[in-house]
Image (cartoon, rainbow, N blue to C red):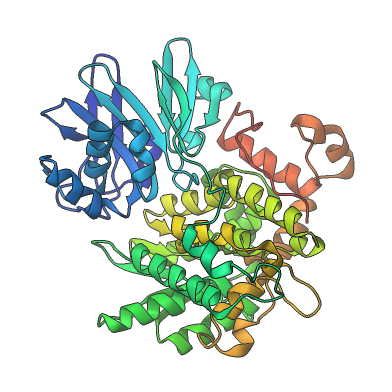
Amino acid sequence: MMDRLTHRGPDGEGTQQLPHAWLGHRRLAIVGVEGGGQPLHEPDRGLWLVGDGEVYNHRRLRADLEAQGHTFRTDSDHETALLVVDAWGQQALDRLWGMFAFVIAGEDGRFIAGRDTLGITPLYWARAGNTTLFASELKAFDPHWRDHVEPFPPGHVWTPGEGLQAFSELPERRTPELATLIAGHEHDPEPPPAVLEAIRDALITAVERSMRADVPVGALLSGGLDSSLVCAIAGDLARRNGWRLPTFAVGLAGSEDLEAARRVAAHVGTEHYERIYTEDELIDWVPEVIGVIESFDPQLVHSSVPNLLVSKLAARHVKVVLIGEGADELFAGYSHYAEIDSDAELADELRATIEGLHNLGLQRVDRVAGANAVESRLPFLDFDVVELGLGLPARWKLSGEDRPEKWLLRKAFEGWLPEDLLWRKKAQFGEGTGARQVLRDHYAAMVSHDEFAAQRGVVDPPLRSPEELAYYRLFQRHLTGMDPDGVVGRFAES
């Protein structure tokens, strides 16, 4: 299992055998580079931890724990997670701000597994008899275990004695501060200026938090609104601290995204890198991409091929990349949201989409980054931004003839980008880079209509197109015997 995950952690490996547990870890060093090797050990309590992700508020929690007499041996954010659970119990996981998945094992027989609320950091498990296995990717599991694999649910903690328990969930109600800002304006067609300011402040703070690392940081820049805003903020913060933000873009020659990315980079003043690929390259990368992302969903494949190529480019220069994932789900950026004209229906749809991110968009983000030994940071999915976004009246997110998608987000950042880029119509990443149509045409032609009719029922729900069947065949080559039901998320048809 460790060997199958070498790509996720080229900076080191470690294992620990206990009477009731075996822990293994592949390390990508981002925070606490010198002393953060895993498994982390707390010798006074006989505890060990292996984990993935980042705890952004670890310094504040560390100060609280030190004030109570706890001693730290490393600068690792995961040591803070270990001592938080030991000192305050497993329900204290809701005090960890960031993206994480980890297991803790104790010499006294304790065993605890937990995953962050949004499922940004991956975690899978498989249970059979008295044995439970955990891993960050599906490919880690032996073929004879693959029928048992399930996603570990976000916002949950598990122990052998108490089973699975929720420790956190998406916020259900507005914070008092937001309620005060909205009071008296909830039914207005537009929000008051104070709400727009709150959106700006929350995202700026989230970007600043996401840039904290002990290694070089850059940003993926597609030229779309979300990544452009992240780059505008990060570029400004970098400039104030005396350095230039590296940005990275890919696309077919002449693609809309490449041109838009160049203009954003020039406007922001980043150190910009790009890669121009050919149609043949796109087609040839698909088999490897499907093995990387562990999915056969066409929409995910379309976006993942350029995403893999831009991540390979970024990995030559940085170890952390900022990306714009999450804005569409918080601010109603997808085209099908435009068909909704009910506030309540849109609010429910956005919440459901965010809850399903962990095995769709976030799966692509994690696997592509992990395959290239870089870490993705997602400012739009910082919990403060999520809490604010879900608390805003959905009527301000409705789109129509006079109001483009993500109007609220665009309005909040007027002046941060050139007007035509700020109000540029959304294109899916695979569409804007030129990948979508190229891949659709090629892979759909690989499956005859008779083959599709005979084999589309191999999964439930059935495969939706000859193109998806072609991708499913490649998926089975990489993950022989894997039942995708409940493990592989699939977008609604578009």
Q: Nearer the viewer, residue 333 or 86?
A: 86
Side of 16 relative to 323 (left or right): left
**What percent of the width, then of the height, locates residue 31?**
24, 54
At a point 16% along the width and 25% down the height, the residue shown is 46
Q: Residue at x 48, y 59 (%)?
A: 176
In this image, 228 relative to 239: left or right? right
Residue 368 x %, y %: 48, 53
Residue at image location 34% in from the left, 31% down from the top: 90
Of residue 127 and residue 278, the one placed in the foreground of this image is: 127
> Residue 359 lies in what quarter of the image?
top right
Tell me where residue 16 appears, x and y as whole percent: 22, 26
415 vs 327: above or below:
below
Q: How far across and down, in percent of the image, does residue 397 sit? A: 68, 67
Q: State the residue in front, 419 or 461.
A: 419
Residue 76 visible, this angle: no
Q: Is residue 57 above or below residue 450?
A: below
**Which residue is drawn at the image coordinates 49% and 35% (left, top)?**
139
Q: Is residue 139 visible?
A: yes
